[in-house]
Amino acid sequence: MNTKLKISNVTKIYPGCVANNNVSLEFNSGKIYALLGENGAGKSTLVKILSGVIIPDEGKIYLNKNILKLNSPSDAKKNDIGMVFQHFNLFETLSVFENLIIDSDEQRENLREKIDTIMKKYNFSIDLDVPVLNLSAGQKQKVEIIRCLIRSPKVLIMDEPTSVLTEQETSELFLSLKKFSEEGILIIYITHKLKEVMQLCDEVAVMRRGKLVSVSQIKNENMESLANKMVGQNLKTIKKKKENNSSEQLINITNLNFTSEDPFETNLVDINFSVNRGECLGIAGISGNGQSELFQVLSGEIISNKNSIKFNKNYIGDLNPQERREYLMAFSPEDRLEQAAIPQMAIFENVALNNFKSSNFFNNGLINENKIKEHSKKIISDFNVNTDNINLKSQFLSGGNLQKLIIGRELITSPDLLICFNPTWGLDVGAINYIHETLIKINEQNKSIILISTDTDELLKLSDKISVIHKGKLSKIMNAEEVTSEKLGILMGGGN
Amino acid sequence: MIVDINFVGLIIASIMASAVPLILASCGELITERSGVLNLGVEGMMIIGAISGFALMTVTGSLIIAVFGAMLAGVLISTIFAFLTQTLITNHVATGLALTIFGIGISAMIGKNFVGIPGKEFPVLFEGLKDTIPLLSPILFGHSIVFYFAFALPFITSYFLKKTKIGLIVRAVGDSPESASNQGINVRFVRYACILYGGAMCGLAGAYLSMIYTPQWIENMTGGRGWIALALVVFSTWNPIKILIGAMIFGGLTIIQFHMQAIGVRIPVQFLTALPYIVTIIVLVVISRDSRKIRLSTPSSLGKSFHKDN
């Protein structure tokens, strides 16, 4: 039977922001639809309305000519709308089976049988009795999908499903989605990744600032046209000039090991690498394979053996982050609001946290506010942070602006080495472009970068050399020109 | 010296009796905390239960009314906590502390008229079997119904959490209220229910103290047992069976150090008095060292307010 889902004149207003402005869309089963847009374009709000998490201020939703009343997630479930959220809605400490039975009315045995059938049909293999926190991101997503499939949905909504997946897991997911579509499930695929839209979808709806900008057939579009629709202006493509860098070694890591007491952290095993001046070393990997541990060891949050890190002819393995900064290292951690900045503190206070002896932010233990504010203003103008209020609490900055502020704070002292971890995670195309340009500029000034990232496209674009981290071990270091994303994907999954 | 084997049995029984209020309050608080709510008002709810039970018993003369009335009093006072933390989204810690201070104060006020009044005898079960088996008889027979209930409770609680659907929902809410809400579970309702249940168990624990354990009303008679119950929950890593072990160790050392003081062992009294607290915590920390299990049984959202945004 054909399914037809219609969104009609949906509006949702938040204080100070129109998340959805009179959006109307129509979907038919048998096709895969893409909902494309930057962060904050309103696509997540729209799908949350479809899944009953958010109630719209105005507008109606029809499923096969019936008006749907979606006041809660259970209403959406009752109406055969299944949704896989970007941030998994799983209970980490419960077993897979417990996660699945919790919203099911079926008997344990019946449900187990049903799950087994689904897993066989789509070639999933997941141990039902382990706690969810032991699963990889890809497996967690499969659990979410199974949860939807148990209810044999008419509509399946996927919200940014590939942000945590490897290349292989992504293609597996695409195969499954195509299969679901053939079986008559209507699929709505939310993303900001253009490549995926081109690969997977039949039709694409583009949203910008809460409004629907265009609806079109994929065959009439290309990556560039979609990007321009999404951003609303012509984007310049940036490319790194690959030059012969100097052969002067800046940082050298030898036999670095880290054994964690926390069983949910990854141990680092025999890490060896070096980075030359003016070079960018990219470290790829699926998240949770030791990246955050590696970042912490490199930044000095975790102190290691003195001789394991040699930076600029000094052995600094036993120094803390502040001491390493004095040697002209700089750090941009993954979690912007938890590790890099303090959300409740003003912009200028956050700037002062990066306390160099030479910067004279403090006189005899007192805060030199004028000096710090002056310095903050310089960062804001130099690095294009879109605010003029340095008293603003950093939690009110958008992700992109916050990241620019952090990168600016780190770079304004012109460090020799910047270590960054997922610097563009969750940012929109415009901000990503800016960060990428900045990183390229650093390399051009003969400064070095260690870029730990889960985004392979970003790594291929920016790195001179690439290595892959898998279960705390680093692969051999390869020249970026010789590497393809497929090759990276295999290494990321633990292959050779 | 000849040790009378029945005397040993009696000591063990008295240890178990002293563990009863701890087990009741801890198992109640455990359910509350498993749903993600940290209620530091255990001491306050216990003392309210103690005075309510004793007062109702004196006024109505009915033990049944008194016991259930004490539980109801626990429910009522925890409703205040639930309303503040779940509906008005106040901070769990501050609200819980206020609840304890409130409970101690109001119980002292109500209790003024009941000081010095003798309590009633609480009926015991299986008294006829008391002399049948050496050692075991005094342990197994001749106790109040609350006593038997308390020793069944950790097992019931464990079964409830692991094997029943409602138990699963409680754990799910404590693990991630956001996910639970997105799954269509009414987080606020579940948390209200768990808080009220915790209140009922604390009320019962208080009633046990004032009606059965030492049948009289003394101001501040819970004497910090509520705080110990709270500590048991945390140091047992939210495991009901370990609560039972911890409560037994605590009760045991409390009783034994009394006897040691009475015999006149030459150890400073202060040290003896502190001993149960120290040893209980050390033992629980040692038996709960598996950090993987801690991660799996700790309610991740403990003490964090949740409100649905729309």
Image (spheres, coloured by chain):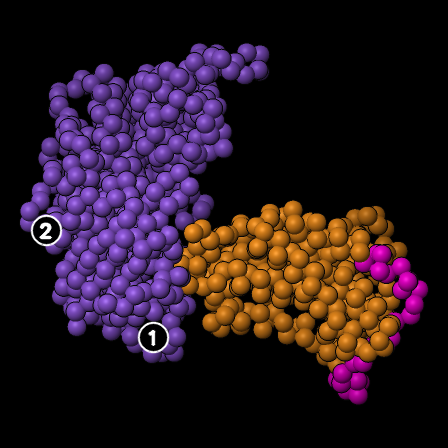
Chain colours: A purple, B orange
Where does residue A302 sit, x and y in percent of width and height? Answer: 43, 33
Q: Residue at x 44, y 25 (%)?
A: A347
Q: Amino acid at mark 2?
A: Gln
Residue A111 marker: 1
Look at the picture and state if A387 lies above or below B49: above
Q: Residue at x 61, y 58 (%)?
A: B82
Residue A375 falls left or right of residue A311 = right
First-in-chain label (2 vs 1)? 1
Residue A17 painted magenta: no
Q: Chain of mark 2?
A: A
- Badge 2 and badge 1 both on one subunit: yes
Q: Is residue B287 visible?
A: no
Disc 2/disc 1 C-alpha distance (Å): 39 Å
Q: Tag 2's secondary structure?
A: strand
Quarter-wise, where is residue B108 in the image?
bottom right
Residue B196 marker: none
Q: Which residues are magenta?
A: B107-133
Q: Quadrant of the N terminus of chain A?
A: bottom left
Label 2: how many Cα within 10 Å (few below 14, some 14–19, many 20+): few
Q: Residue at x 70, y 60 (%)?
A: B77
Q: Amino acid at mark 1?
A: Leu
Where does residue B262 sit, x and y in percent of width and height? Answer: 88, 59
Q: Residue at x 65, y 46 (%)?
A: B94
The residue that label 2 is drawn on is A217
